[in-house]
Amino acid sequence: MTPVNTPAEPEDDREQTFLEHLVELRGRLLKACAAVLLVLLALLPFSRRLYSLLAEPLSAQLPAGSSMIAIDVASPFLTPFKLALLLALILSIPVVLYQIWAFVAPALYRHEKRLAKPLLYTSVLLFYAGCAFAYFVVFPLVFGFFTSVAPEGVTVMTDISKYLDFVITLFLAFGITFEVPIATIILVATGITTVQRLARARGYILVGAFALGMLLTPPDVISQTLLALPMWLLFEFGLVMARILLPDRVKAAAEDEADEDQATN
């Protein structure tokens, strides 16, 4: 007799009370905050050196005799501290995501875990890759352009606080942009859309990438283009990975569309 196929149950199907969930959530949040705090304490002694490294792409483009300045009285202290805190958050992302995963994982089915776990790790790596792309590729081009178009008689001397706010915006923009493949795979995996529909909407995606680049980056063509083109290429990469990771869903969607076309004709 052929056994009846039943959907896989979550590995931990023991029901917890609402209070137990709150206690576990509090413990996970405390561990995540502790990780951020420990990394922050480790980075604080090097905060000024870290800011010098962050300012290197701009400092290399400044004219001879000019330098960065601090307008506010507390900026020489608060700006490096703010940078150290931001780096602590970024470097602690793996620990924070692990705590979130440990809290959510018991409620997931086995097949959901198989897909979610690699996506979780890959999303962290892609975020880091986006930040690295912004620092090593985008910053030299953008700051070189800005300093080259300064009117004659104007000395370029950027405030350190304004500079940090500017680069944080770019880091977040490119870090989030590099998550496009993960978003594409999730959309296909959850059945919200299909690879075929996304492929047909390629032109709209490209236009939307440039529109999003205009909103997320400073008002210059260089940074907008450097954000839009990787976004489009990562979208194409996401389509390829969706076909590899979700062959059954892609095949089923293709068969459904073929049946719809036959019914229409």
Image (cartoon, rainbow, N blue to C red):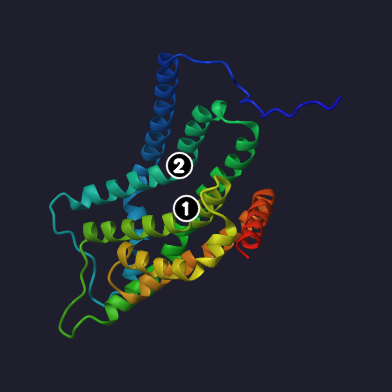
Q: Under tag 2, what secondary structure?
A: helix
Residue shown at the point (22%, 80%) measured from the top left = 150
- Residue 173 image point, x, y percent: 37, 58
Q: Which mark is residue 127?
A: 1
Place residue 24 in its image quadrant: top left
Q: Nearer the viewer, residue 215 or 150?
A: 215
Q: Nearer the viewer, residue 95 or 105?
A: 105
**Can I make out residue 83 in this image?**
yes
- Residue 139 image point, x, y percent: 38, 68
Q: Earlier in the sequence, mark 2 or mark 1?
A: 2
Is residue 44 placed above or below 178 in the rendered structure? Answer: above
Residue under pointer 2: 93
**Can I make out residue 125 in this image?**
no
Place residue 169 in its image quadrant: bottom left
Q: Is residue 135 left or right of residue 2?
A: left
Quadrant including the C terminus: bottom right
Disc 2 and disc 1: Cα gap in Å?
Answer: 10 Å
Residue shown at the point (30%, 74%) measured from the top left = 220
Q: Nearer the viewer, residue 31 or 119?
A: 119
Quadrant including the N terminus: top right
Q: Is residue 136 left or right of residue 58?
A: right
Three-letter code, disc 2: Ile
Tell me how many marks there are: 2
Three-letter code, disc 1: Phe
Q: Nearer the viewer, residue 3 or 234?
A: 3
Q: Under tag 1, what secondary structure?
A: helix
